[in-house]
Amino acid sequence: MSSTVSQLEPEVLKSRIARFRQVQVEMVTQVRRVIVGQQEVLEQVMIALFVGGHCLITGLPGTAKTLLVRTMAQTLGLVFKRIQFTPDLMPSDITGTDIIEEDPANGRRTWTFVPGPIFANILLADEINRTPPKTQSALLEAMQERACTVRGNNYILPAPFFVLATQNPIELEGTYPLPEAQLDRFLFNTVLDYLDAEEELKVVDLTTVTSIPQADPVTDAQEILDFQQLVRMVPIGESVARHAVELVRVSRSSDENAPDFVKKYVNYGASVRAAQFLVLAAKAKALMKGRYHVTYEDVRSLYIPVLRHRILLNFHAESDRLKQDDILKRILEWKAAPSQ
């Protein structure tokens, strides 16, 4: 960890951190021209981008999920594609397919690969839970391997590659819940809620006039890849990393240190990937706050969005009307941060 940092000259490191902060501030400024409120959601989507993770956005219809993702893509100067997931969507509709083309000169026929919408930097998977598992698995491979396989040929996806998937928490008829393995691939499950009255009024003012605001690009693909490396270089103290790992471990009912309420309500806790993502996200948050070290608060503030889709509750929780967030809040109250 420290050896990676020492390879960079202090001045170079300082200028890269300054550039990171500048881009981040400009991104927020541009997004704010279009998106009102949703401060926490915006922060989480930006962290996912700087970590190189994927984000699942859960929100009711009309809460600007699609607009947020499109605006983010504009500010980043990246290639943006959208797939509207439906029950009849096939894997080839996502990955692309081979077609036979005939050469007019000699009449020879050859296979030609036509790339699908997955060949983008930012992919919006709209209503991801509306498509069958066969199609979801094509996206799963792309999210994990940053590549896709068509007719036995492997194609590398552009870098950076970033999936923002949305799902609607109501209307669950005719949907295919995401398998645990796929949910685990998402860094965050971000919840978009309704705006308050003042913010809603501002949205109406912004969107019911003749000119619709647009966001301008403030960075490019190569710089984002550099930022992702910079985030991984941020040092984290052993005690802070240990706290992150302990918070993840006590979400498992099988863990000997888990509190009684976890043993009572949780079927399966979070995976090792949760601890990796929690630390990476905390590093990105520290940089975004202008610090070059991770605090307990960075870890704790991101605990719920990183873990809410990784723990499975049992029927006791259902009968007591408890949700994942309730259990995770209780864990944070039960396990306080060590005193500095």
Image (cartoon, rainbow, N blue to C red):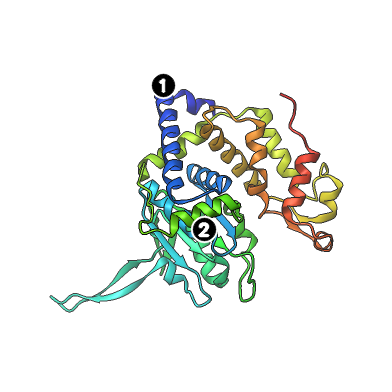
User: Hey, which quadrant is residue 16 in on the image?
Assistant: top left
In percent of the image, x 69 and y 28: which residue is there? 239
Tag 1 residue: 9
x then y, percent, for residue 128 = 54, 65
Q: Is residue 283 above or below residue 216?
A: above
- Asked whether, in this view, residue 121 is left or right of residue 111, the answer is right
Tell me the distance, in whole angstroms, between the alpha carbons under discs 2 and 1.
Answer: 41 Å
Mark 1 is surrounded, within 10 Å at the Cα level, by few (under 14), some (14 to 19) or many (20 or more) other residues, namely few
Q: Nearer the viewer, residue 28 or 164?
A: 28
- Asked whether, in this view, residue 272 is left or right of residue 92, the answer is right
Amino acid at dot 1:
Glu
The image's mark for residue 26 is: none
In percent of the image, x 43 and y 25: which residue is there? 13
The quadrant the N terminus occupies is: top right
Q: Is residue 335 above or below residue 190?
A: above
x then y, percent, for residue 175 = 61, 72
- Asked whether, in this view, residue 141 is left or right of residue 193, the answer is left
Q: Is residue 71 above or below residue 152?
A: above
Callout 2 secondary element: helix
Q: Nearer the viewer, residue 42 or 312?
A: 42
Mark 2 is surrounded, within 10 Å at the Cα level, by few (under 14), some (14 to 19) or many (20 or more) other residues, namely many
Tag 2 residue: 65
Residue 201 appears in view: yes
x then y, percent, for residue 304 = 67, 47
x then y, percent, for residue 146 = 45, 54
User: Hey, which quadrant is residue 172 in on the image?
Assistant: bottom right
- Asked whether, in this view, residue 301 is left or right of residue 54, the answer is right
Callout 1 secondary element: loop
The quadrant the C terminus occupies is: top right
Residue 147 appears in view: no
Q: Mark 2 or 1 closer to N-term?
A: 1
